[in-house]
């Protein structure tokens, strides 16, 4: 039997965290559920205390200074405290489905497997949330569309493999020992998209295998207060947040000598496209003019990047 530590960062989730915890406790393979409370403004800490007293497998932690440090530092603390052979993540307003670890039980029998990912569904917690965000998420799965070799996952996540799809942290299970290949885990200075940045680097250093891709193994809870929901919907301008994400990936790629040059160029161009998209109008067109002269291929790839194009025009 597997020994899985489930890490749940908790912030402003008093309405949802009980469902998240109980969805993880349904599995005998889960040896512990680690609630890492990040100084929530609501009553989440008290709910977490009740859950820890009710369930033997649930442990509650806070940062040493009891402060708010963001999702990256909170997940890092969970990784530090985890004692299982495998680690899985779950957002406090999301939940696992009964098939969450069905594929993992078989795939992890192969000791070369370092991680397994699956598909994420969506649930709207209210009619208002559905009316506001259905056009963004609909009822689609967040998933990698086909089963790929681990060697293709990194470039696939970077959009270098066509319509590859996306890995979501809720569906990822990692062999904890394999994390030693990474120098650091979640970037604490990224307040948004630190999970995406982590997944990019993780897919480079670890061999990640496909699990169940054609049906959900976990569910994203969509509600009005969710910060990522606001980013994905455009309430928070995505270019302004993604420019920081791609800056981080670009700097890492420069320092990682084993990354092929064509991949480094792709990362640099993607970073540049978001820089241009986020620039004020006069500077934006000067940047485009410069890149048309110095790197026509790069600016063309930027102009055909859907995220860049919708922010540009």
Image (cartoon, helix red, strand yellow):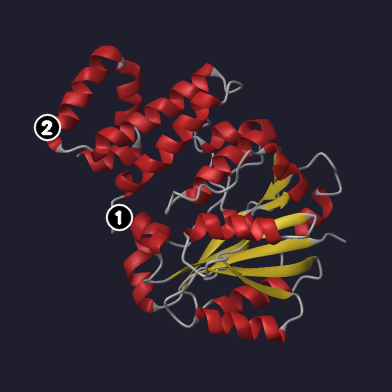
- Whichever of labels 1 and 2 marks the residue nearer the N terminus, that label is 1
Mark 2 = which residue?
282
Q: Secondary structure at mark 2?
A: helix
Residue 74, placed above or below residue 256:
below
What crowding class fits label 2: few (fewer than 14 Cα within 10 Å), some (14-19), or many (20 or more)? few
Q: Pointer 1 and pointer 2: residues touching (CB < 8 Å)? A: no
The image quadrant where one finds the C terminus is top left
Q: Nearer the viewer, mark 1 or mark 2?
A: 2
Query: Does residue 92 appear in the picture of this structure?
Result: yes
Q: Quadrant of residue 102?
A: bottom right
Residue at 38% across, 64% down: 134
Q: Secondary structure at mark 1?
A: loop
- Taking depth in this image into account, of 183 and 128 the one nearest to the observer is 183
* Position of residue 183 measured from the top left corner of the image (x, y, whole percent): 63, 38
Is residue 283 found left or right of 203 in the rendered image?
Answer: left
* Position of residue 200 measured from the top left corner of the image (x, y, whole percent): 55, 39
Cα separation, mark 1 vs mark 2, equals 23 Å
What crowding class fits label 1: few (fewer than 14 Cα within 10 Å), some (14-19), or many (20 or more)? few
Residue at 34% across, 39% down: 306
The image quadrant where one finds the N terminus is bottom right
Is residue 304 found left or right of 159 in the rendered image?
Answer: left
Identify the disc placed on residue 283. none
Residue at 49% across, 49% down: 194
Query: Does residue 216 appear in the picture of this structure?
Result: no
Residue at 48% across, 83% down: 43
Mark 1 = which residue?
234
* Position of residue 252 measured from the top left corner of the image (x, y, whole percent): 51, 32
Residue 183, placed above or below residue 143:
above
* Position of residue 197 measured from the top left corner of the image (x, y, whole percent): 51, 43
Q: Quadrant of residue 203?
A: top right
- Taking depth in this image into account, of 173 and 13 the one nearest to the observer is 13
Number of numbered labels in the structure image: 2
């Amino acid at each position: 039997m597997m020994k899985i530590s489930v890490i749940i960062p908790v912030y402003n989730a008093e309405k949802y965290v009980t469902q998240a915890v109980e969805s993880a406790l349904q599995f005998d393979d889960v040896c512990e559920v680690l609630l890492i409370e990040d100084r929530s403004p609501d009553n989440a800490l008290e709910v977490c205390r009740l859950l820890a007293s009710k369930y033997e497998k649930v442990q509650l932690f806070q940062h040493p200074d009891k402060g708010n440090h963001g999702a990256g530092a909170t997940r890092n603390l969970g990784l530090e405290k985890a004692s299982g052979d495998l680690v899985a993540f779950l957002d406090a307003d999301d939940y696992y489905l009964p098939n969450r670890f069905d594929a993992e039980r078989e795939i992890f029998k192969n000791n070369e497997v370092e991680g397994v990912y699956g598909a994420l569904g969506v649930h709207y917690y209210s009619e208002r949330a559905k009316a506001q965000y259905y056009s963004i998420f609909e009822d689609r799965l967040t998933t990698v569309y086909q089963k790929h070799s681990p060697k293709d996952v990194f470039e696939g996540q970077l959009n270098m493999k066509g319509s590859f799809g996306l890995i979501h942290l809720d569906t990822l299970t990692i062999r904890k020992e394999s994390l030693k290949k990474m120098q650091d885990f979640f970037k604490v200075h990224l307040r948004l998209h630190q999970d995406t940045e982590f997944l990019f680097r993780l897919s480079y250093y670890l061999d990640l295998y496909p699990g169940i891709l054609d049906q959900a193994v976990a569910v994203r809870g969509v509600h009005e207060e969710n910060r990522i929901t606001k980013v994905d919907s455009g309430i928070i301008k995505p270019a302004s947040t993604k420019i920081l994400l791609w800056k981080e990936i670009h700097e890492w790629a420069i320092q990682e000598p084993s990354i092929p040059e064509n991949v480094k160029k792709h990362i640099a161009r993607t970073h540049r496209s978001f820089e241009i998209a986020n620039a004020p109008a006069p500077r934006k067109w000067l940047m485009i003019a410069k890149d048309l002269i110095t790197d026509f291929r790069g600016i063309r790839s930027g102009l055909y990047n859907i995220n860049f194009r919708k922010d540009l025009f």
